[in-house]
Amino acid sequence: MFDALAEKLQETLSDVRGRGTLTEDDVNKAMREIRLALLEADVNFKVVKQFTQTVKERCLGAGVLGQLNPGQQVVKIVNEELTALMGGSSAGITFSPRPPTVVLMAGLQGSGKTTATAKLARHLKEAHGSSVAVAACDVYRPAAVEQLVKVGTQAGAAVYEQGTDKDPVDIARWALDRAKTEGKDVLIVDTSGRLHIDERLMQELKDIRKAVKPHAILLVVDAMTGQDAVNVSEQFAEAVDFDGVVMSKLDGDARGGAALSVKAVTGKPILFASVGEKLDQFEPFHPDRMAQRILG
Ligand code: GDP
């Protein structure tokens, strides 16, 4: 994950660390290298510009020039800014004081939404001991309902489904009533994705949101699609105000551009990372740990 970026940043910072004192030219050179490394990792160019500018200002402002061993301070600043770039502290899901907590999953077809629905169910069950139900409202993608029955059951969740002939908004409403009756702590609603964002997809999401009044809306995006994932997130953010991102397929993302850009571009933090096809390959996203991992 993000190997090339990690290697380049570590190389640049180790160079900086190795110097006794730093001149402004040294800082500028390091910023140029960091900028290149981030651009090669497919990070949004505006984000890169802002990032290097902030790091540079902080380095010069902290009076690192002329100090003894200033490199350590530069590394610390880069680490802090990388953490802030990815959202600062990790947030997760806030449970409603009146269960069930309703979570709506949104995203394009193929983004990993159905998989993430089951993974989140498993995570909430394992980490919080919650009783979870998942609702199958993706009635358009062939086999999405059967897939959710399979992975949802494996995850230890109750799967609420009514096949593919009913209206997804009605299914969502019915599922919420059932979750209340059965005393579930959490209801996760899998919604339909399309190949592209279109008016119908957005309207359906808004209708389901109105019907079940979710406590959290999570947008699942495929990290492997890089800046496309960021653009999709931006468009979703304009249409339905989601709360956070599930970054899926991070295991297959060699570059890291989406993970490093999405918070700065959309204002929405990454809450969870999906890092493989298996149900347990899913974890809360910790920006500080990710920054640490990138900087070695
Ligand atoms: P949906 O159409 O958005 O519901 O997408 P699916 O949940 O069906 O996922 C699409 C494909 O991506 C499936 O083959 C999943 O096994 C795969 N997938 C989902 N999440 C991950 C992940 O984190 N890593 C990898 N490598 N594959 C994933």
Image (cartoon, helix red, strand yellow):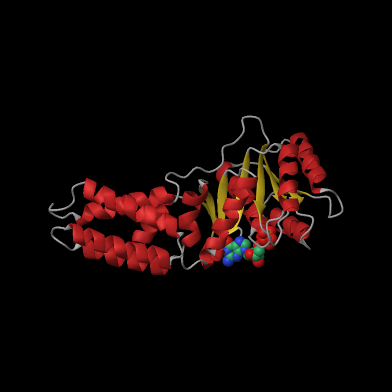
242 with respect to 201 (left or right): left
Instruction: Please tell me which residue lies in front, 42 or 14.
Output: 42
Percent across and percent down for residue 256 are 46, 62
Visible in this render: residue 171? yes
Name the residue: 73% across, 54% down: 192
Query: Looking at the picture, does residue 35 appear above or below residue 106?
Result: below
Name the residue: 46% across, 66% down: 255
Ligand 1 quarter of the rendering: bottom right
Percent across and percent down for residue 210 are 73, 38
Visible in this render: residue 249? no
Percent across and percent down for residue 119 are 62, 54
Instruction: Please tell me which residue lies in front, 269 or 278.
Output: 269
| Residue 154 found in image quarter | bottom right
Name the residue: 73% across, 52% down: 199
58 with respect to 143 (left or right): left
Query: Looking at the picture, does residue 25 appear above or below residue 56?
Result: below
Percent across and percent down for residue 45 are 43, 60
Q: Quadrant of the C terminus?
A: bottom left
172 with respect to 83 (left or right): right
For this orientation, the residue located farthest to the top is 97
Instruction: Please tell me which residue lies in front, 24 or 180.
Output: 24
